[in-house]
Amino acid sequence: MLRILFVGDVVGKVGRRLLHERLRRIQTELDADLTVVNVENAAGGFGLTGPVWDELRRLPVDAFTSGNHIWDKKETLELLDAEPKLLRPANYPAGNPGRGVVTVRAGKVPVAVINLQGLTFMTAMESPFLAADRILAALPAEVVVRFVDFHAEATSEKQALAWHLDGRVCAVVGTHTHVQTADERILPRGTAALTDAGMTGPYEGVIGFKPDSVLERFLLATPRALEPATRGGALCGALVEVDETSGRALAIRRLRYEEGERP
Ligand SMILES: [Fe+2]
């Protein structure tokens, strides 16, 4: 049995601090064989910078996933080409740097990590459903364990992709909304599904940002710079147990570790 630890969207300084302080202990406590972390909001809530990536890449993480904010900082574009374990959603148009799939190893077991992005209320691009079909068809047959981070806004789209991929991947775990959902389940053919893993960052705010800066956008209907919040840190994610011979999920558990609580 293989245990895959997934950590949801790391937001700003608080998210990074939680990761540095807690990840190793959580991995030990949960006996994780493989760790995947979504880092699209790691630099002040928007993408990655060189120094932030330099910090993150030293962590015991097998693959980093992302989403729409990975393009926010120009310097990330080079990183996407240079760093095979840093993914961006696979269904962005050809011509963009980077990749959306990587095969990593948990001991001897190859595991494909796939990053996709939703279309509903998001930028129009290739259907994540068709992109997933294309990606799975191209994977070598021996890669039976396949994990999907689906970065999407609409709960229905996220649940629908899990059903579309039921029996073909071990898990479809959602990211992007930063609010953990309580709907973890195993679908009939063995795919674990969780609509959103929740963020790793400051919860005293609006999806990780200071309430005042977000409220101005809503009250004045004009763009305002968002500032990451600083309090109420929690690390959120999911643990998926997978039978490595069939690639089917055996269990999925939601994770939430408040700052100050052990581990
Ligand atoms: Fe996002």
Image: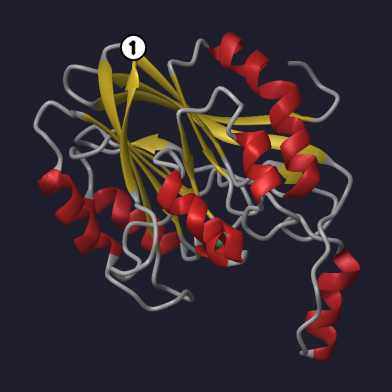
- Residue 98 left/right relative to 134: right
Q: Is residue 95 visible?
A: yes
Residue at figure coordinates x 26%, y 17% from the top left: 109
56 or 1: nearer the eye? 56
Badge 1 marks a residue whose secondary structure is loop
Residue at figure coordinates x 68%, y 41% from the top left: 200
- Residue 8 left/right relative to 22: left
What's the amino acid at mark 1?
A: Gly
Q: Exactly how many numbered labels are in the figure?
A: 1
Quarter holding residue 156: bottom left
Residue at figure coordinates x 62%, y 57% from the top left: 47
- Quadrant for the N terminus in the image: top left
For residue 46, above or below residue 39: below
256 or 71: nearer the eye? 71
- Quadrant for the C terminus in the image: top right
Where in the image, quadrant-wise, is ligand 1 located? Answer: bottom right
Quarter holding residue 58: top right
Percent coordinates x, y for residue 77 in the rendering = 50, 60
Percent coordinates x, y for residue 222 in the rendering = 77, 89
Here the colouring is: secondary structure
Residue at figure coordinates x 17%, y 17% from the top left: 245
Give the residue furthest to the bottom.
Answer: 221
For residue 86, above or below residue 118: above
For residue 249, above or below residue 121: above
Q: Is residue 87 visible?
A: no
Residue located beneath label 1 in the image:
107
Percent coordinates x, y for residue 185 in the rendering = 39, 36
